[in-house]
Image (cartoon, rainbow, N blue to C red):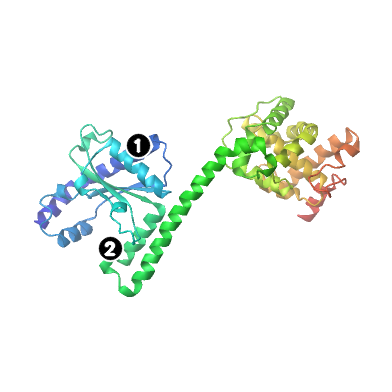
Amino acid sequence: MSEGLLAAYEAQLPAFEGLREAAVAHTARLIAEAGLNIHHVTGRVKKRPSLEDKLRRKPGRYASLSDVTDLVAVRVITYFESDVGLVSRLLEEHHTLDWDNSIDKSMMHDPDRFGYMGVHYVVEVTPQTPDLSAYAGSKFEVQIRSILQHAWAEIEHDLGYKNREAIPREVQRRFYRLAGLLEMADEEFMALHRLSRDYAETLPQRVQEAPDSVFIDAASMTHLLAAPPVRDLDAEVARSLNVPLLTGWNDPERPQRLAKLLHYVGVHSVGGLHKELRRWRAEVVRLASVLMPQLRVAWTPAGGARPGTSVVHYALLRACMNPALNPHEIVMLLDMRGVLSSEQLVQAVQGAYAQISAAQAPHKLQSGGSARADDEARAPAGLQAGLTDD
C-alpha cells in the first residue's frame, strides 16, 4: 500500500508544487485585500522522506493519497496572537473547509498547560475557489501561527518533543515554564500594539488640550506634520521659494528623524515646539529662503519642499545660536550625507545665517533665541565650533 502511495506521490509532485505556488499567492492576496498586516506567507510540499515516515507511523490509515491532507501546506505567520483569529475567520468565510481534519489547538489545551496553540485548517478547493479552480478536488493545509507560537513550534520540533510523553520528566517543568513565558510575551506584545494604536488615536485631542504633556516622538511628529503650526509654516517656506509643498511625500522614516533632531536641539514636547516655531517664525522663513536656493542639488529632485522643512530650518537656526550643538550631528540626523559633504552643508548654513543676521538688528537673533538659557549670542560661532570639533 505504501509503495503505491509513494509512486502516486512522485507522479503528482509537479501538480502539488503548482498548487503550493497558487495557494500561497491566493492566501497572500486574500489577507492583503482584507487589510491585515502579517509577517509573511510561505508554502511547502511534503518531502518524500516525511511522507514515508507518516505512512510508516500510521499504517492502514491512508487508503489513497487524497487522504493525506497536508501534502501541500501554506503557513501564515502573524505578528500577534489576536491576528491568528482574524486570519482564521477570513479562511472560514472564503473557503470550504474539511472540518474533520482541521484543528484549532487553542481549543484543545488543558487550562494548566502551555505551549503551541496554532490553527491548522484543511481547505477543500472547489471550481468556485478564486485563483485555484484549476486544482478543484484537491486539498491543502493552512497553518496559522503568531511569531512566538512559530518560534515555540520550531524549537519543540527541533528538540524532538512532539507530545507530552516524549519530554523527560526532569525537563518538563522548565519546558512548560518556558512555554508559559512565550504566551505571556505574546499577550504583552498585543497589549503594546493596542496601547500604540490608542495613543495615535488620542493624539489630536491631547495635542489640542494639553500640548505640553505630549512628548515629541515619531507618532506625534506624524500628526504635527499635517497640522498647524508646522503645516502652515511649511507652506510659508514653500511660498517664499515659489515651490509646492509636497504634502503627499512618502518618507515613513522622516517623522522619526525629525523627532530625534528636535530632541538634539532641546525641544521635547509638542507645546515647546509650538512656542518655538511661533517665536522664530520669521527667522525660519528667512533662513530657508536664503539657504535652500544654495542647496538645490539636495532638494530639487524632490520637486518641492518636503513636510517638516520648517522644523529642519528651526533646528539649523538653533545650531547657529548655540555653539554647544554640533552641526555635523544635525546633518547626520537628517540623513543628508552623500548629497553634499558635511562641510559643504555646514558652510552653506553658516553663510545663510550670517546673511540674515546682517540684514536685521543683531540682537534679535542673538538674544533669548534658544529653548535653554545658555543659547545666547555668539552666532555663528556654533557652526564654526562644530567644524573644528568634528
Q: Is residue 347 visible?
A: no
Horizontal side of residue 27 vs 251, given as left or right: left
Q: CA distance from mark 1 to mark 2?
A: 31 Å
Position of the C terminus by quadrant: bottom right
Q: What residue is shown at x 65% (from left), y 29% (from top)?
A: 304
Q: Position of residue 148 (x, y in %)?
A: 41, 55
Q: Is residue 123 visible?
A: yes
Q: Is residue 122 above or below residue 61?
A: above
Q: Which kind of residue does numbered mark 2 sit on?
A: Lys
The residue lying furthest to the front in this view is 111
Crowd around label 1: few <14 · some 14–19 · many ≥20 (10 Å):
some
Secondary structure at badge 2 equals loop
Q: Which residue is mark 1?
A: 30
Q: Which kind of residue does numbered mark 1 sit on?
A: Leu
Instruction: Report the mark closest to the observer, 1 or 2.
Output: 2
Q: Quadrant of residue 239?
A: top right
Mark seen at residue 74: none
Q: What residue is shown at x 22% (from left), y 45% (from top)?
A: 16
Closer to the camera, 251 or 169?
169
Q: Earlier in the sequence, mark 1 or mark 2?
A: 1
Q: Which residue is mark 2?
A: 162
Q: Is residue 338 above or below residue 309?
A: below
Position of the N terminus by quadrant: bottom left
Secondary structure at badge 1 equals helix
Q: What residue is shown at x 35% (from left), y 60% (from top)?
A: 115
The residue lying furthest to the left in this view is 1
